Image (cartoon, coloured by chain):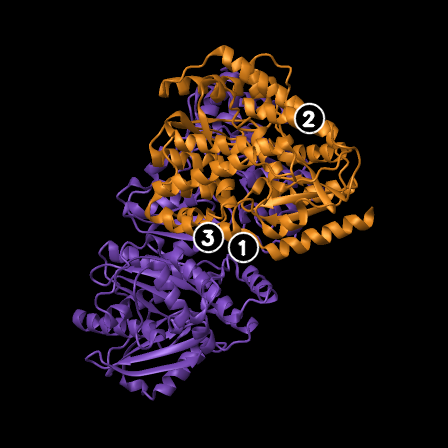
């Protein structure tokens, strides 16, 4: 770990225990400063669009921390067009935990959650989130809205935190299959979500603003389809963090002006990149441990290999962006998400995108505690390798150093790269 | 036979087709098949289900999409060509009882009937369906202990019944808590109207932790007749720890039993449940008097038969310690105990009463009485340190944190599960890797320079982490400090439920390890009292209980 990050992490460890409000201020200041640095003093090693997104993501993470009374806690799959239209900021576990891990500060909050009885085997994103709330660092938002999509812990951590803060909680139940009846079922719940927000706050939905947000959302997804097409024969010197930021752009930030601008800039800047490829092309499944030193040195800014895509960024691309009614479009997107339902849905999507991106191999990253991803890993390896894509099952953690063994991860990743290099 | 996985599964529909059904809940002999199919970090129950289905016991499967693991197991059984399953269906479980959810579930039930009719060629019989409802819930009138939480299994249920003989045991765990009373419907009523009622009845059961509104679960423990709760969790099932973390403050005795869904190491399970039995009995005001043996002689003996060593303590009639002996246990507990007695030089005729404790306590034939080491450590600790409020006991194969009330009685305890991380055995294994003896291991970490973290939860993983740290040229001092810290953190997690750590004492062999003690003091932010011979505390407690039993017997006579 970088010495400055280590010192900051240790500082937050002590501060959060004694002065949670002060810890929040310092965390917000650091995130904001890091974002502003990317915007006004960009590094030359990254595309300008990536740096813009670093600022935009940091800004959208800090805003709810500063103005919690106009914020909601949401789950990563919640269609947030309604919230963007109403001017409600969003906090979500994955972003909160990612920023903590980037600053080496996750340890105290994970310990706090475990001390409160959370199992060691629970997803670290949600443990960080629970620890942040129950330590008094995360300010109390107006309400919590989450979906049941993809992950068990959706049923648990949001309810717990809503009880802890004593704030209203709404949950959208997402069936595992697409059908016209299920579409109506989800659509009805999205309408009731609007009623819930209006009943519990002064925020009111303006249909025109929702239509604008839905329009931005559709255009963003269309841009990501173009990015996919462009990326097929372009080499890009990049870092793992970029893919995590794209996950935010196609999920909670989808429908925002910033996410649309990011996707537009990416299309333009990629179009200007020279055609050609260098090194091994990896397709990544699930979240990325972008803070893990050993993997960073192996995968970031190197000619040896590049991550050409990540399935979490692309999981909503099957949505029908032609749907005019915003509620139908959002419900459709939830049901058609490639992480919804049977494991084969996701495996087939990975196969499709690996082919479209002309990947050499696939890394199936089993984030600690994620039964959805780990549960499909063996079948994925078998199916993907039968179709000609060597697949590495890599165990680790997207946001906690506690569950990551850097030495082992590097050995496995390096051996996988050697294997792919020999095949070329 | 149709196998189902969840209490919300509409099994009565299968009765409407004349089919028999059974909950898939067997423990696994091994995970040979599932370990090749599922990632090691998947819920153990899910792996056991996969093993069971693969063995070929079920021709048809009816699953509810009730958790991530169930969903992935259903994926896996659908791909398993050798299981003999010719029909499988996985239904979505709505997470609430709103009108929309009930109607959606009704539609799924009707669709399921349709599918099964097409598959089997059998017509759904409403009369059979309606007559299959039976009030299966056992009426309990007296005191009972409740099994709560995630999946329990046959081994746990049987051990509980054995330890709580004479007390009713109510199994309210996840799938065993199915309660669907018959509902009013005419057999000529339209099917969708019947299915609407059925959908509502299924979803209105006492909610599991997946449901949005779980207030109905409070009824499970509200009864005054509930003496205590045995809370079952399964490794890598995270649902129920959320409830368990909030149960600890309800004032009812509760113990957590985590299973990996294999035949549990029954010795440890029995010790824990008997310890819990003693706590429950004490709390409900019943003395621990059992049928005792002869009452003569001048010494009270306590024998602690542990996994590594056997300790004996002899007290005279005035409760002064007159002998302390420690011998290796060896392969048989009885032989170790006999050897300790021989070494003590005490004649059989001089023994007034003997109490045995520790893992081997039931195999010591000359003992008059046996009691768990949890009660014994508490009793011994109170004798050595009158103000004691809590005891940390770390022995060879387990670690415990025991809370004491003002009278020195056990008011609660937590104990590690099968995993050896955080125990003496863990430190011994690490000492071997680092080529240290236990004495050096105790001191060397005190002078560390770099604050290393050994974060792996599992002994096996920690071992490879230590090997990596050695490869990175970290000093042995720093690694040992990291190990001490990991034991301390594990113990800190165990002591999370202890209300009063103000007068903390440590017993068991690991109390002699200065590095671990120092780290524990740091982590718990309190001074720890270490008796002169911490490893004898359990045997001392047993000897004190021997005296108590002897006097009670005399009094009753």
Chain B, colour shown: purple
Label 3 sits on residue:
A7
Q: Residue at x 25, y 58 (%)?
A: B282
Q: Residues within 10 Å of mark 2 (few under 14, many from 20)?
A: many
Q: Nearer the viewer, residue B193 or B340?
A: B340
Residue annotated with mark 1? B262
Chain under disc 1: B
Q: How many marks?
A: 3
Rendered residue at 55%/14% (across/down): A212
- In this view, the mark in front (2 or 1): 2
Say what secondary structure mark 1 lies in. loop
**Residue projecting furthest to the front:** A41
Q: Colour of chain A?
A: orange
Disc 2 target residue = A267
Considering the image in quadrants, where does the N terminus of chain B appear? top right
In the foreground, B420 or A64 = A64
């Amino acid at each position: 770990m970088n010495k400055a990050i280590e010192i900051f992490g240790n500082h937050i460890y002590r501060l959060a225990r004694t002065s949670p409000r002060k810890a929040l201020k310092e965390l917000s200041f650091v995130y904001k400063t890091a974002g502003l640095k990317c915007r006004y003093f960009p590094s030359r090693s990254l595309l300008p669009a990536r740096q813009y997104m670093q600022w935009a993501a940091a800004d959208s993470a800090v805003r709810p921390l500063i103005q919690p009374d106009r914020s909601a806690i949401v789950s990563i799959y919640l269609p947030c067009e309604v919230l963007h239209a109403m001017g409600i900021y969003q906090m979500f576990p994955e972003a909160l935990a990612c920023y903590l891990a980037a600053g080496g500060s996750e340890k105290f909050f994970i310990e706090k959650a475990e001390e409160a009885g959370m199992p060691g085997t629970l997803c670290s994103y949600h443990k960080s989130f629970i620890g942040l709330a129950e330590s008094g660092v995360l300010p109390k938002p107006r309400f919590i809205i989450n979906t049941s999509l993809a992950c068990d812990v959706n049923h648990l951590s949001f309810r717990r935190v809503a009880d802890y803060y004593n704030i209203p909680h709404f949950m959208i139940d997402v069936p595992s299959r697409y059908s016209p009846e299920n579409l109506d079922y989800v659509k009805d719940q999205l309408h009731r979500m609007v009623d819930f927000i209006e009943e519990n706050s002064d925020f009111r939905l303006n249909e025109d603003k929702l239509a604008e947000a839905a329009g931005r959302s559709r255009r963003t997804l269309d841009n990501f389809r173009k990015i996919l097409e462009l990326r097929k024969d372009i080499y890009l010197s990049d870092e793992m963090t970029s893919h995590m930021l794209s996950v935010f752009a196609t999920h909670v930030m989808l429908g925002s002006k910033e996410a649309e601008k990011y996707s537009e800039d990416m299309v333009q800047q990629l179009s200007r990149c020279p055609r050609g490829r260098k090194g091994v092309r990896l397709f990544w499944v699930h979240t990325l441990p972008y803070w893990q030193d050993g993997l960073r040195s192996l995968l970031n800014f190197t000619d040896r290999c590049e991550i050409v895509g990540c399935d979490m960024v692309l999981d909503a691309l099957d949505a029908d962006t032609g749907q005019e009614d915003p509620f139908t479009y959002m419900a459709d997107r939830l049901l058609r998400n490639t992480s919804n339902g049977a494991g084969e849905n996701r495996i087939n999507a990975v196969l499709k995108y690996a082919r479209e991106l002309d990947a050499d191999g696939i890394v199936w990253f089993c984030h600690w505690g994620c039964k959805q991803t780990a549960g499909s890993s063996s079948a994925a390896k078998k199916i993907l390798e039968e179709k000609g894509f060597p697949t590495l099952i890599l165990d680790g953690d997207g946001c906690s150093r506690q569950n990551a063994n850097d030495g082992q991860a590097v050995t496995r990743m390096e051996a996988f790269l050697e294997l792919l290099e020999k095949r070329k | 036979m149709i196998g189902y996985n969840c209490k919300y599964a509409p099994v009565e529909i299968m009765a409407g087709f004349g089919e028999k059904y059974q909950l898939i809940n067997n423990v696994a002999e091994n995970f040979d098949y599932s370990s090749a199919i599922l990632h090691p970090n998947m819920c153990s129950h899910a792996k056991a289900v996969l093993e069971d289905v693969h063995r070929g016991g079920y021709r048809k499967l009816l699953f509810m999409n009730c958790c991530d693991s169930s969903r992935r197991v259903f994926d896996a059984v659908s791909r398993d060509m050798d299981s003999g399953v010719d029909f499988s269906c996985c239904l979505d479980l709505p997470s609430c009882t709103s009108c929309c959810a009930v109607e959606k579930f009704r539609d799924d039930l009707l669709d399921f009937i349709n599918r099964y009719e097409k598959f089997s060629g059998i017509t759904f019989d409403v009369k059979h369906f309606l007559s299959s409802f039976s009030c299966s819930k056992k009426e309990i009138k007296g005191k009972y202990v409740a099994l709560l939480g995630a999946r329990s299994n046959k081994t746990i249920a049987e051990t509980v019944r054995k330890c709580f003989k004479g007390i009713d045991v109510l199994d309210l765990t996840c799938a065993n808590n199915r309660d669907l009373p018959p509902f009013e419907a005419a057999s000529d009523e339209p099917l969708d109207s019947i299915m609407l009622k059925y959908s509502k009845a299924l979803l209105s059961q006492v909610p599991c932790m997946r449901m949005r509104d779980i207030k109905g679960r409070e009824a499970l423990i509200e009864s005054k007749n509930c003496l205590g709760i045995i809370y079952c969790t399964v490794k890598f099932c995270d649902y129920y720890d959320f409830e368990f973390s909030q149960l600890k403050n309800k004032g009812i005795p509760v113990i957590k039993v985590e299973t990996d869904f294999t035949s549990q190491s029954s010795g440890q399970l029995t010790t824990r449940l008997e310890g819990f039995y003693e706590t429950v009995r004490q709390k409900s005001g019943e003395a621990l008097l059992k049928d005792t043996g002869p009452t003569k002689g001048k010494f009270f003996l306590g024998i602690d038969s542990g996994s590594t060593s056997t300790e004996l303590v002899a007290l005279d009639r005035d409760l002064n310690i007159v002998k302390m002996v420690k011998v290796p246990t060896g392969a048989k507990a009885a032989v170790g105990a006999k050897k300790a007695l021989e070494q003590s030089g005490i004649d059989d005729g001089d023994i007034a009463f003997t109490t045995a404790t520790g893992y081997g306590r039931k195999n010591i034939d000359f003992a008059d009485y046996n009691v768990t080491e949890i009660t014994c450590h508490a009793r011994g600790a109170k004798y050595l340190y009158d103000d004691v409020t809590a005891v940390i006991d770390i022995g060879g194969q387990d670690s415990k944190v025991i809370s004491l009330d003002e009278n020195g009685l056990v008011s609660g305890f937590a104990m590690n599960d099968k995993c050896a991380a955080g125990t003496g055995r863990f430190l011994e294994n690490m000492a071997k890797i680092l080529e240290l003896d236990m004495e050096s291991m105790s001191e060397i970490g005190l002078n560390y320079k770099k604050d290393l973290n050994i974060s792996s939860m599992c002994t096996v993983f920690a071992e490879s982490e230590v090997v990596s740290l050695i490869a990175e040229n970290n000093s042995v001092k720093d690694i040992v400090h990291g190990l001490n810290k990991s034991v301390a953190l594990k113990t800190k997690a165990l002591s999370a439920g202890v209300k009063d750590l103000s007068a903390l004492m440590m017993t068991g062999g690991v109390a002699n390890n200065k590095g671990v003690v120092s780290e524990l003091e740091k982590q718990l932010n309190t001074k720890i009292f270490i008796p002169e011979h911490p490893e004898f505390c359990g045997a001392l407690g047993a000897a004190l209980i021997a005296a108590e039993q002897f006097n009670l017997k005399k009094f009753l006579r």
